[in-house]
Amino acid sequence: MELTAVLIFAAPVAVWTIAAWTTAASGASGWAPSAAESVIVGEGRSGRSEPRSASTRTDHVRNMLRSVVGAHDGFPVVPAIRRAAGIATASWPAVLCGLAERLTTIPARQAHGLKRLAALAGVDGAAGPEGDPPARPAAGSTPLLTPPDFGAPPTEDLVASCPAHDERRFLIRTEDGRQVVARLHGHHDGKSVLMLPDGWLGIPSMLVPTEEPFRPMTADEMVTGLQAGAFADFGLHRTEHYLILYQSADDGFAKANGVLLEDLYRRLLEAFRKHEVTVHEAEFPMVAVIFRTEDEFRAYRPVAPDVQAYYEVSTNRILLYDQPSRERIEPEVNALLKPQMVAHEGTHQILQNIGVHPRLSNWPLWLVEGLAEYCATPASSRKGAPAWDGLGRINNLHMATLREVEDPVSLSMRGQDVHTKSLFRKPGQPLVEAMIRRHELTPTEYALAWAITHYLAMKRSDDFTRFLRVMAAVPPLEPRSADDHVRDFRQAFGDDLGKLDKTIHAYLSRLTKQKGYDPMPYYAVLFEQPLANGRLRRAAMVSQSPQLIKQWVDEMSNPIAGLASWQATPFPSRGRATLAIQDWIRSE
């Protein structure tokens, strides 16, 4: 019996098509197609439109985070150091080399003070035949930080001369001439990444060892820097562990998220200590930046349209916004997704500040995102301020997504062959192994990552704890391949991954009968968008999954057409939702 069988709905849904206009198929086999049932209502007599395919959320986040973070006005630019780009997952040698390449494309306001691009990363931007950065600086480049001894030994010798990780400290000169002590965070292939006193990561042009102590900035010092730069007009809400900068006149959203993040921080520490995973208090005050609107959020740093929040590894900040810039009718969906979004990004930040997931440590993506989703379950309430259920709760949003996986009606309406469509799994390959090897995730695969993590954490807790200890020991910047990730997983949980597929399948089936499982309603989703020719594109779908609803709307929206609007109305049954769509179609 296939792993996904129990996840398929028994009842089919009727489909009405007024015109032959369809969206692009973007599903996956196994557990993972990417959309729910839909009724496509076309553009009058305009004929067939070209489909608009949407990139996955994770791909957007990875591409966004791989771009150059740029200098931040709130802290003096360090001429001798390139603050590292915010990386989600990538080959670390390629990342280090890529920093120098990408500096030439960043806006002038971000590049302020970056005068010697090649010297910043110690490379000339050219990769070798295997993608590794060149081992020597570009000819003729002058380091921005010149050590007193012009015959300084190479980076490898300097690092090797330091007896212990926490003793490897170096002097860095800031733009205003001040010297600060930075700490070695990671080293690979002749390149070093340093931790700065404000928690930023940077790449030095040269290393000047020092015996002076590394002193993290205090909260007051960080506030001074933050409010002197790009966030000068932002309000500040302080909690025990967070500095929350907010742009809105009302501090209600900032305070609500402060409560959520502090609760998340406390519960995560307690959980890992209970399971004897070594953790420590956050060394730096953690920063969250809340922009007033979506437009202002995107103006600060361009990101993909479906990125609504992100954790920036290099700056150690989470960034999000309060209000969507375009008033779309989606209160139910927004109320469900927003607390999960905040808790998800907050989990990334916390785990990389308490010692569980070292920053720039190359973890498999299923674990990075699955663990964040495991910790980010939203509360059952579907309205109001952000709420959080706590660790390990049944995630009703993901369960709804998984229940729609491989629904033949859904796939047939989107033009997908349920027998041959295979986005990421080779024939005969266990789904768990395919997930381990993934370097990007669709919304449905986020649900799969949550399911794997939930099973391992709840039913294989001892093995999962040992696995987390192994992963926590992975040094920053250490290259790791997909084969390495599969090997580590097999060592922790056994070689028979096909059997594990079936076990997780049965586990998910049992979750639907447990206390705490609250089935999502069926949403009748109505979509409209005016077109340039004066006609109106209209479409509808039925789904229980807010994630798939959002993905479908993104796929439907034409960026060069008029302002799209959509409405998601909940109903207690699929039939009621379908009837609502029929009535909407007839009314027009």
Image: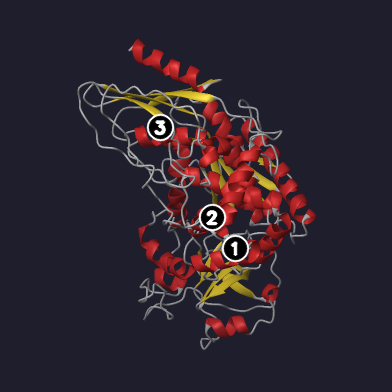
> Which amino acid, by three-letter code, is at mark 3?
Val
Q: Are marks 1 and 2 in contact (CB under 8 Å)?
A: yes
**On screen, 361 above or below 151?**
above
Residue nearest the viewer, comparing 382 with 75: 382
Element type where label 3 sits in the image: helix
> Which amino acid, by three-letter code, is at mark 1?
Phe
Residue denoted by label 2: 432
Q: Are marks 3 and 1 in contact (CB under 8 Å)?
A: no
Mark yes or no: residue 210 visible: yes
Q: Are marks 3 and 2 in contact (CB under 8 Å)?
A: no
Q: Quarter holding the C terminus?
A: top left
x, y (%) of residue 571? 53, 20
Q: Residue furthest front?
A: 1
Residue nearest the viewer, comparing 128 with 438: 438
Q: Is residue 249 left or right of residue 47?
A: right
Mark yes or no: residue 313 visible: no
Residue denoted by label 3: 409
Element type where label 1 sits in the image: helix
- C-alpha gap between disc 1 and disc 2: 10 Å
Residue visible at 38% across and 78% down? 138
Residue denoted by label 1: 489
Snapshot quadrant of residue 238: top right
- C-alpha gap between disc 3 and disc 2: 25 Å
Residue nearest the viewer, comparing 94 with 108: 94
| Number of residue marks | 3
Mark number displayed over residue 411: none
The disc, 3 or 1, on the residue closer to the chain's N-terminal end is: 3
x, y (%) of residue 306? 44, 40
> Which amino acid, by three-letter code, is at mark 2?
Val
x, y (%) of residue 394? 65, 39
The disc, 1 or 2, on the residue closer to the chain's N-terminal end is: 2
